[in-house]
Amino acid sequence: MYKILTKEMLSPAICRMKVHAPRVASSAHPGQFLIVRANEHGERIPLTISDFDADEGTVTIVTQKIGASTKEICALEVGECLEDVVGPLGLPSDFVEKTDEELAGSRYIFIAGGVGTAPVYPQVKYLKSKGVYVDVIIGAKTSDLLIYKKEMSEVCDHLFICTDDGSEGFKGMVTGLLEKIVSEDGYEYTQAVAIGPMIMMKFVTQTAKKLGLPIIVSLNTLMVDGTGMCGACRVTVAGKTRFACVEGPEFNGYDVDFDEAMRRQGMYRNEETEADHKCKIR
């Protein structure tokens, strides 16, 4: 059992929890994920690690209430326990394997969309600890859906805010803001990383290509079982079938077949709607 030490609602539908899981915390790296179960009958939910502290023996998870199982996780309170926290799973971000000399002179721009902002945080935090220049764009539909603004501002060089409705920061899509800061404001980068909704990552990749900027994307939203057994996260990358959970979740954005990935993402929508309906009845 994994005790919940802190809980905070970042928005009405997004919950952040710090969980006591010493063995997981001691092995975790940026870019990896966990499998979480709320109770013994609960569904296995893959959640990207949002922070970890080996000394405290804690990992932080951010869960968006979308279906029945994620609502069960968010319903738990401080002092209660998650049934399972399995991990770390997946491959760490590529830069974890690089030496300080290899990272020297790098300039990263992270584009974070919605709840995808949470797994961006440990990556930015790690890179800054290595002395790497890092800027971050956080995008959301409205200002009340923006998360991790304070935390991100403390670990990056420049934080850019973007909202669809203009309620805070740049009015428009993250693609427009990325193009503005590179083409008009003169910011230069050697690597982009995008984490967020699949459709966002597709168009950010297209924008990065236009700007001549290498880009990595995270396909964590495709994962179901998290072990490669179910095959739900199959995706075509550079013309080959890859499994996001065991060969990712991060891939070269230029190589990803986003249209196929989005079709696969909708495969279980009817089952999830039915499960959510049953949960409401209970």
Image: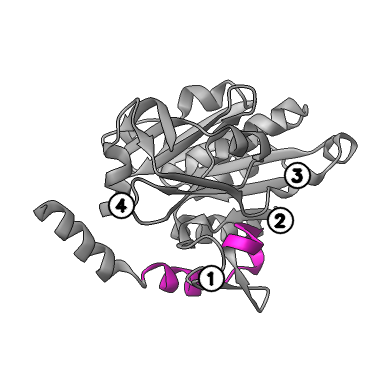
N-term mark: 3 or 4: 4
Q: Dot 3 corresponds to which residue?
A: 95
Measured from the top left, where is residue 46 in percent x and y?
Answer: 47, 53
Would you identify the image quadrant in which residue 227 lies? bottom right
Q: Give the range drawn in magenta.
A: 245-266
Residue type at mark 3: give it. Phe
- How far, Cα to Cα, is label 3 from label 1? 27 Å
Q: Dot 1 corresponds to which residue?
A: 229
Query: What kind of element bears circle 4?
Result: helix
Q: Dot 2 corresponds to which residue?
A: 212
Q: Dot 4 corresponds to which residue?
A: 69
Say which residue appears at 52% left-offset and 37% top-offset: 50
Contact, CB < 8 Å: mark 2 with mark 3?
Answer: no
Would you identify the image quadrant in which residue 129 lies? top right
Which mark's residue is nearer the viewer, 3 or 1? Answer: 1
- How far, Cα to Cα, is label 2 from label 1? 37 Å
Contact, CB < 8 Å: mark 4 with mark 2?
Answer: no
N-term mark: 3 or 1: 3
Residue type at mark 4: give it. Ser
